[in-house]
Image (tube, rainbow, N blue to C red):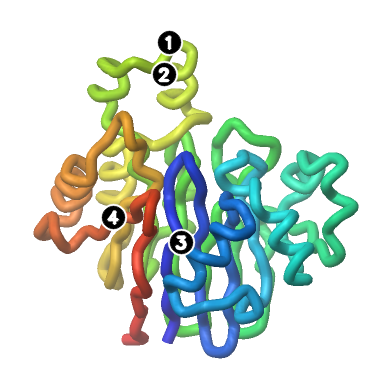
Amino acid sequence: MMRFASLGSGSQGNGLVVEAGATRVLLDCGFGLGDAVSRLGRRGLAPGDLDALIVTHEHDDHLGGVVRFAARYELPVFLTHGTFSALDGARAALQDVTVIDSHTVVTVGDLEIHPYPVPHDAREPAQFVFGDGAVRLGVLTDVGAPTPHIQAMLSGVDALVLECNHDSGMLERGSYPVWLKRRIASRFGHLDNSAAASLLAGLDCSRLQHVVAAHLSQQNNTPELARAVLAGALNCAPDWIRIATQDDGFDWLGITPR
């Protein structure tokens, strides 16, 4: 059985643990060293329980804690060439780096990790589908607009962590400067609730056991709005949709083979 848990999700820091068999990886680490260790502890884990760090892109809320964490606990890091190049001088601190192609499967222990490229304002951003041969977990955050390739990668997954960054009306009415509103709403920015729901409605959802709304803006969205639109796309009760919070992420969710 696979399971997954979030250490926190949002503009102040992101981290997602994925486990299959004896293998555990951390997708992104946007937290300081002590904070990351504390958040792992809430999920019953210590840094030594991890086998690798996987990185989506170089923005600080995803990459900010990666170098110190990987160097301190001697963890291998997997990331694209573009993300690696963004590290600049910090690259020397990493002892074990694997540069990955965003279309090529990577195996870490009992996990098969399928990267895929996404439109976002970073050098070479990637998102991931994790599998153990029986079930698959799809992860999609930090993406400006769905693409046919994204739809193909996520269709038929058994669980999905899906960005619902903002409500377009709240963003437009909010206090952010115009340039920031345009960046967030652009095709290289972040998914709004409606775009996330539209993507979800177009997927093969027949195997879905969990849907988690992630990377919610604390200023331009609410859990209730995100839940409502995703539930509408799935024709399910809103409380079936889980929320990844900034402060506490979400606790372990298991994915059972069918």
- Secondary structure at badge 2 equals helix
The residue that appears at 34% across and 55% down in the rendered structure is 244
Q: Which residue is mark 1?
A: 178
Discs 3/4, front:
3
Q: Residues within 10 Å of mark 2 (few under 14, many from 20)?
A: some
User: Would you place residue 230 above or below residue 225 in this image?
Assistant: below
Q: Which residue is mark 3?
A: 7
Q: Earlier in the sequence, mark 3 or mark 4?
A: 3
**Numbered label attached to residue 13:** none
Q: Earlier in the sequence, mark 1 or mark 4?
A: 1
Q: Amino acid at mark 3?
A: Leu
User: Is residue 35 rendered to the left or right of residue 195?
Assistant: right
Q: Residues within 10 Å of mark 4 (few under 14, many from 20)?
A: many
Proximity of marks 1 and 2: CB atoms separated by less than 8 Å: yes
Q: CA distance from mark 3 to mark 2?
A: 27 Å
- Secondary structure at badge 4 equals strand
Report the front residue among 84 and 153.
84
The residue that appears at 33% across and 43% down in the rendered structure is 164
Q: Position of residue 48 (x, y in %)?
A: 65, 79
User: Is residue 129 rendered to the left or right of residue 250?
Assistant: right
Report the front residue among 169 and 220.
220
Q: Amino acid at mark 4?
A: Ile
Q: Which residue is mark 4?
A: 243
Q: Earlier in the sequence, mark 3 or mark 2?
A: 3
Q: Quadrant of residue 229?
A: top left
Q: CA distance from mark 3 to mark 4?
A: 12 Å
Q: Which residue is mark 2?
A: 181
Q: CA distance from mark 1 to mark 2?
A: 5 Å
Proximity of marks 3 and 2: CB atoms separated by less than 8 Å: no
The residue that appears at 52% across and 58% down in the rendered structure is 15
